[in-house]
Amino acid sequence: MSTVLYITANPKQVSASYSLTVGEEFLKAYTEKNPKDNIVRIDLYKDNIPQIDEDVFSGWGKLEGGQEFSSLNANESSKVSRIDQLCNQFIEAEKYIFVTPMWNLLFPPLVKAYIDTIVIAGKTFKYTAEGPAGLLENKKALHIQATGGVYSEGPSQDYDFASKYLNGIMNFIGVNDFQKLYIEGFSQYPERADEIKQKAITTAKNLATIF
Ligand SMILES: Cc1cc2nc3c(=O)[nH]c(=O)nc-3n(C[C@H](O)[C@H](O)[C@H](O)COP(=O)(O)O)c2cc1C
């Protein structure tokens, strides 16, 4: 049995979002194939995702300086412990599904805030004399991304920063199996929107049986 984190970052309703619609179809097919797996939903627009701010730095600073956790003030302790909880949850899972829209060539900013909670030195990566090394092993990730343009091929390929970054950051912490599912071209080919969505759903269902 695997624990699967289903991580979404979209303030829209599922029915109004291509990525969430395809993501739900993926999840349905995945759950049918793997009924015993534990699916944990993380909605970055609803869940508490602390940003690394002054409280976090001062809290971390106190702990690194050898002070007890009880010496942290209320803001420091709530943010530091939530970051710890999110990082532990990520470490304990086996599979990750990121479902995001492309916004201005990247994903929504809460995805970066979430990444800042899971990429923690000593927990998910470490520095060695040869450079950084990921500490996670035997995990896999999937990025389901909806875009108005086409980024999987053609002239905009170089601008697919979101998937490239997610792939890079997953590799950085040791998640080397990274797959992508593009749902793309809604603005470029508006007349083909339904066809693009249906094709992506078929791809998602097939992928779900082997992910
Ligand atoms: C704020 C904003 C910025 C966007 N920027 C891009 C972009 O840089 N490139 C692109 O191809 N589409 C862009 N789009 C279009 C979305 O990627 C497209 O509508 C996609 O379907 C959104 O995913 P969703 O349907 O799951 O919400 C943008 C949309 C919004 C709302």
Image (cartoon, helix red, strand yellow):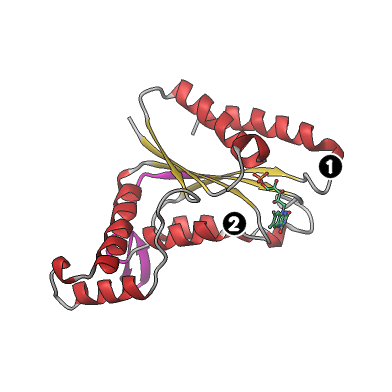
Q: Nearer the viewer, residue 134 or 67?
A: 67
Q: Quadrant of residue 42?
A: top left
Type of the residue with mark 1:
Pro
Which residue corresponds to the image point at 59% horizontal and 56% vertical from the top-left? 107
Residue 163 placement, left or right of 64: right
SS at circle 1: helix
The spot of residue 2 in percent (x, y) is: 35, 34
Q: Residue furthest front?
A: 74
Which residue corresponds to the image point at 66% horizontal and 28% vertical from the top-left? 202
Q: Which mark is residue 190?
A: 1
Using a 10 Å C-alpha cutoff, classify the residue at mark 1 as few (fewer than 14 neighbours), some (14 to 19) or many (20 or more): few
Q: Quadrant of residue 76?
A: bottom left
Q: Nearer the viewer, residue 7 or 48?
A: 48
Q: Which mark is residue 86?
A: none
Q: Where does label 2 land, which residue? A: 107
The spot of residue 36 in percent (x, y) is: 35, 24
- Would residue 61 be visible to someone looking at this image? yes
Q: Say if the magenta span includes residue 156.
A: no
Q: Is mark 1 within 8 Å of ligand 1?
A: no
Using a 10 Å C-alpha cutoff, classify the residue at mark 2 as few (fewer than 14 neighbours), some (14 to 19) or many (20 or more): many
- Would residue 209 be visible to someone looking at this image? no
